[in-house]
């Protein structure tokens, strides 16, 4: 039911949440970035009910975020691997991780380091050149998929948030 | 019930999802970055049931993501505003937006532009200097909150994902 309202929203955030907003989906994607590929390993590591895991994995495969690959010479065993579309969720995961590190009220359990240079990964941010932008620095303009009604709404939003006009 | 399993996970992503993983929470935060402050406006714009909205807003206030402010001279009207903690979810939102733009199967409805320079916002990424990193470029090291058991698991993960050893 809630999905319906998302579908009707002309918003890429809503569309993204349509595919990965469900409770477990991003944690399954996280597991994939940790090298997990097999159903039983997802199940054990996440402590998730098998029927829920099956539903989530199927939906991620259907949305093209995971590939389900039959492992050769293994009988019927299959593995789940991130597609390109799935790998491109990495900034979302790392942004959540850094926010959780900062605001979660616990010491960070993990440090992310560039394997090549050994340097720590920078804070994921909304940037233009060296400037880091918050919602009050960003102007919203109609994109190629905007409706006429949206253009007015964006102008109102810019006036409210940027103190223009 | 599912919350319980998250609590037990020593993971900042899980902790972040604990606070904003619920279906509507990030869309409410999105609304705040669009200048929405009043209950009735959230309700109308999101098309969300009033009891669900009340529960979500209360939980975001409780987690320190929103402030509920009584508007002076307005009788009993209150407004919801992002705290610093809430504003720092902006990279998560923009990363989801850009991913939805690219993979959502629709033309981008909105363009994000730096208000000061007029330049388009760059893709949100996991970076070190000018390099953009994916999960296979990042080594995980134990952080200050790591347990001994985790250190072993991270080494296994690094071996699997980075082809080390």
Image (cartoon, coloured by chain):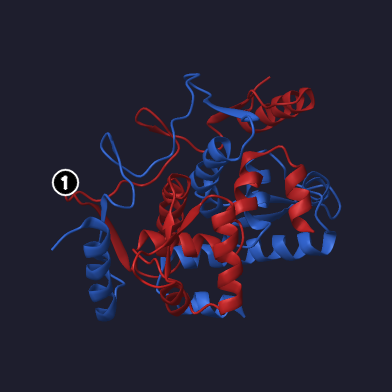
Chain colours: A red, B blue
Q: Quadrant of residue B148?
A: bottom left
For the point 24% across and 51% down, which residue is it?
Answer: A120
Front residue of this view, candidates B91 and A17: A17
For the point 60% across and 73% down, which residue is it?
Answer: A52
Q: Residue furthest left?
A: B165
Q: Position of residue B91 (x, y in %)?
A: 48, 44
Q: Is residue A4 visible?
A: yes
Q: Is residue B139 above or below residue B40?
A: below
Q: Quadrant of residue B156?
A: bottom left
Task: Give the chain letter at badge 1.
Answer: A
Is residue A49 toward the left or the right of residue B134 in the image? right
Is residue A81 toward the left or the right of residue A55 in the image? left
Q: Position of residue B71 (x, y in %)?
A: 76, 49
Is residue B26 toward the left or the right of residue B73 in the image? left
Q: Is residue B38 above or below residue A30?
A: above
Q: Position of residue A35 (x, y in %)?
A: 34, 63
Q: Is residue B71 visible?
A: no
């Amino acid at each position: 039911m809630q999905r319906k309202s998302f579908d009707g929203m002309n918003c890429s955030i809503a569309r993204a949440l349509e595919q990965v907003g469900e409770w477990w989906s991003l944690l399954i994607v996280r597991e994939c970035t940790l090298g997990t590929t097999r159903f039983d390993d997802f199940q054990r590591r996440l402590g998730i009910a098998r029927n829920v895991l099956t539903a989530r994995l199927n939906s991620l495969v259907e949305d093209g975020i995971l590939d389900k690959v039959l492992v050769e010479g293994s009988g019927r065993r299959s593995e789940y691997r991130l597609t390109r579309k799935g790998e491109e969720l990495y900034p979302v995961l790392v942004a959540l991780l850094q926010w959780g590190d900062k605001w979660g009220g616990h010491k960070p359990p993990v440090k992310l380091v560039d394997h090549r240079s050994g340097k720590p990964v920078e804070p994921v941010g909304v940037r233009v050149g060296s400037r880091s932008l918050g919602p009050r620095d960003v102007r919203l303009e109609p994109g190629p998929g905007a409706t006429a009604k949206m253009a007015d709404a964006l102008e109102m939003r810019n006036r409210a948030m940027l103190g223009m006009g």
